Image: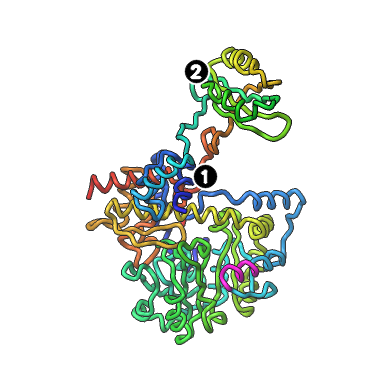
């Protein structure tokens, strides 16, 4: 149960120190550290990353959501195709989804040209892939549960009874 | 002479925190732990119900006592949550915030010269409310030694046996203290023995950590002599919607309603629609907010202990009440930490007897701000103590 609580806090902010997490829970620091070790060792926690609002940076960052349709055969399943696609560093997320298409793939690059080339030269030629539909991301409002923008003004009085 | 102000109004001193307001205005990087209201927005379903009621044009007065449906929902809520059984017909009144309900009770029950004992430190409105009603205030200080719970010894040494009414607020603003059933029993005995009417402000009841809230009105023989106050401001994060209620015997609620119907007429209609929905479908949001407060509570208590300020284990509301270091008054410390570090806290003496030498620190603020604020307080202590 304590692991669950630690996980919840790390999901809220992975940069909470073990000391901070210990202060917020009934655990002591060594128990928090052990819980994090266990979560990592069990593969529950796969990594930690910054959530970036690229619009706040000068340099361009192009991201696209790509719908992929695939055709399976006796030798090739979804996992085989996924494994092959996931290896590309340009692919930042890959999910098998229900609905009109099979895979939902997120791709990142430095330019539209780079991303387009990647899809046309690396993804589309994969024999099992029958169709790709690429949606370039225009604006991101929220990522990983974090809303972008200046945040809401706290309009409360600084003192109230 | 024109505009000859009443003695009652002139007797009441201006609020002790006005000066701090002005200092806080001078800086733009102030993190305020001086706030007595939630940092969460009202649960969406409740806001949506308010919007829908406005769209449907439901903007007329309601029944004086509040919409029947709301009173029924309140009756169910307090029965399920706290074992309080009240008849929505004539034992519940919905008011513009619990503050209005407290004021109504003073005006309905206090005659000139009556004595109202107030367990302090406490919310700052009780004392003026008693004075406006023409009564005399008797401060009953509680202390850190008792973790700011009220004891019979405190009542006796203050002379509360001679009082007519007793005002309690647990979970407490400003200390965060709670009182268990075992701690309330002797207070109930005292009230019965000395024939005191008890006004129990339970606005923070839902914000009780590691245990459940006990209302003094549920103890033997107390229902007939107690008025309970609660509302939607704290647990449902609805402060600006101004909605509270009182529960009590019909005799008292009818008397309060008489004043309410001539002065307020009815509580805000839009807020009543929001409140019905809040009780119908927002339990999960309330639980989530309580969980967040509890996490912050533990964080803030831990940090004060690390910083070296003595703090008792506050178990309710969203306040903790650390002691200032030796040689400081609460006001000096609060002013210093505001001017030098830009952290706003409220000196405990603002809340009456027993509050001196302490700070009310609200944790109704996000963890990132709390972390930063506590680091700044630590820097202030390292620099000066």
Disc sitting over residue A155 in the figure: 1
Labels 2 and 1: the sequence-earlier one: 2
| Residue at 43% in and 41% down | A41
User: What whole-number distance in Å separates the C-alpha atoms at marks 2 and 1?
Assistant: 34 Å
Where is residue A29? Give x, y as percent. Answer: 34, 49
Quick check: A29 left or right of B112? Answer: left
| Observer-nearest of B179 and B142 | B179
Task: Look at the image and give the residue range highlighted in magenta.
Answer: B75-83
Quarter assignment of residue B175: bottom left
Q: How many marks?
A: 2
Residue at disc 2, secondary structure: loop
Q: Position of residue B21 (x, y in %)?
A: 42, 49
Dot 1, crowdedness within 10 Å: few (<14), some or many (≥20)? Answer: few
Chain of the residue that carries numbered disc 1 in the rendered image: A
Q: Is residue B214 visible?
A: yes
| Dot in front, 2 or 1 | 2
Residue A132 falls left or right of residue A24? right
Measured as percent of width and height from the top left, residue B94 is found at 64, 66
Within-10-Å neighbours for mark 2: few <14, some 14–19, many 20+: few
Tell which of B121 and B264 is nearer to you: B121
Question: Could you say which quadrant of the image residue B322 lies in?
Answer: bottom left
- Same subunit, labels 2 and 1: the answer reads yes
Residue corresponding to mark 2: A59
SS at mark 1 in the image: loop
């Amino acid at each position: 149960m304590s692991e669950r609580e630690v996980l919840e806090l790390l999901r809220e902010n992975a940069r909470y120190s073990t000391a901070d997490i210990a202060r917020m829970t009934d655990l002591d620091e060594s128990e928090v550290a052990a819980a994090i070790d266990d979560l990592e060792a069990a593969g529950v926690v796969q990594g930690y990353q910054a959530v970036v609002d690229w619009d706040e940076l000068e340099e361009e960052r192009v991201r696209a959501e790509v719908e992929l349709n695939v055709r399976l055969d006796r030798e090739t399943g979804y996992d085989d195709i996924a494994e092959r696609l996931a290896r590309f560093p340009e692919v930042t997320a890959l999910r098998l989804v229900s609905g009109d298409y099979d895979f939902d793939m997120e791709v990142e690059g430095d330019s539209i040209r780079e991303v387009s080339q990647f899809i046309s030269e690396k993804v589309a030629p994969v024999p099992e892939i029958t169709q790709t539909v690429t949606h370039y991301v225009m604006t991101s409002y929220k990522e990983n549960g974090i809303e972008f923008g200046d945040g809401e003004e706290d309009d409360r009085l600084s003192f109230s009874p | 002479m024109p505009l000859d102000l009443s003695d009652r109004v002139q007797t009441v001193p201006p609020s002790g925190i006005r000066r701090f307001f002005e200092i806080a205005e001078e800086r733009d990087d102030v993190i305020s732990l001086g706030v007595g209201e939630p940092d969460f927005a009202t649960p969406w379903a409740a806001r949506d119900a308010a919007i829908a009621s406005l769209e449907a044009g439901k903007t007329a007065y309601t029944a004086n006592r509040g919409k029947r449906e709301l009173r029924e929902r309140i009756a169910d809520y307090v029965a399920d949550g706290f074992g309080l059984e009240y008849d929505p017909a004539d034992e519940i009144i919905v008011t513009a915030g619990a503050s209005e309900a407290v004021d109504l009770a003073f005006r309905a029950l206090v005659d000139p010269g009556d004595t109202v004992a107030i367990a302090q430190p406490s919310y700052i409105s009780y004392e003026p409310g008693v004075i406006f009603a023409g009564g005399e205030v008797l401060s009953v200080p509680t202390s850190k030694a008792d973790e700011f719970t009220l004891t019979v010894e405190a009542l006796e040494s203050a002379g509360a046996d001679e009082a007519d009414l007793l005002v309690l607020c647990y979970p407490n603003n400003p200390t965060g203290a709670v009182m268990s059933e075992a701690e309330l029993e002797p207070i109930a005995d005292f009230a019965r023995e000395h024939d005191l009417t008890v006004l129990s402000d339970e606005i923070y009841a839902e914000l009780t950590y590691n245990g459940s809230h006990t209302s003094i009105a549920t103890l033997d023989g107390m229902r007939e002599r107690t008025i309970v106050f609660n509302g939607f401001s704290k647990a449902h994060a609805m402060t600006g919607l101004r909605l509270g209620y009182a529960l009590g015997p019909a005799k008292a609620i009818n008397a309060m309603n008489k004043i309410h119907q001539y002065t307020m007429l009815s509580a805000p209609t839009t807020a009543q629609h929001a409140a019905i929905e809040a009780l119908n479908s927002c339990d999960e949001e309330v639980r989530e907010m309580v969980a967040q407060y509890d996490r912050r509570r533990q964080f803030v208590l831990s940090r004060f202990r690390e910083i070296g300020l003595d703090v008792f284990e506050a178990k309710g509301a969203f306040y903790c009440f650390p002691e200032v270091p030796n040689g400081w008054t609460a006001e000096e410390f609060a002013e210093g930490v505001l001017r030098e570090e830009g952290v706003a806290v409220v000196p405990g003496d603002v809340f009456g007897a027993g509050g001196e030498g302490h700070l009310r620190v609200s944790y109704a603020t996000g963890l990132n701000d709390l972390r930063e604020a506590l680091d700044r307080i630590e820097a202030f202590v390292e620099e000066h103590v």
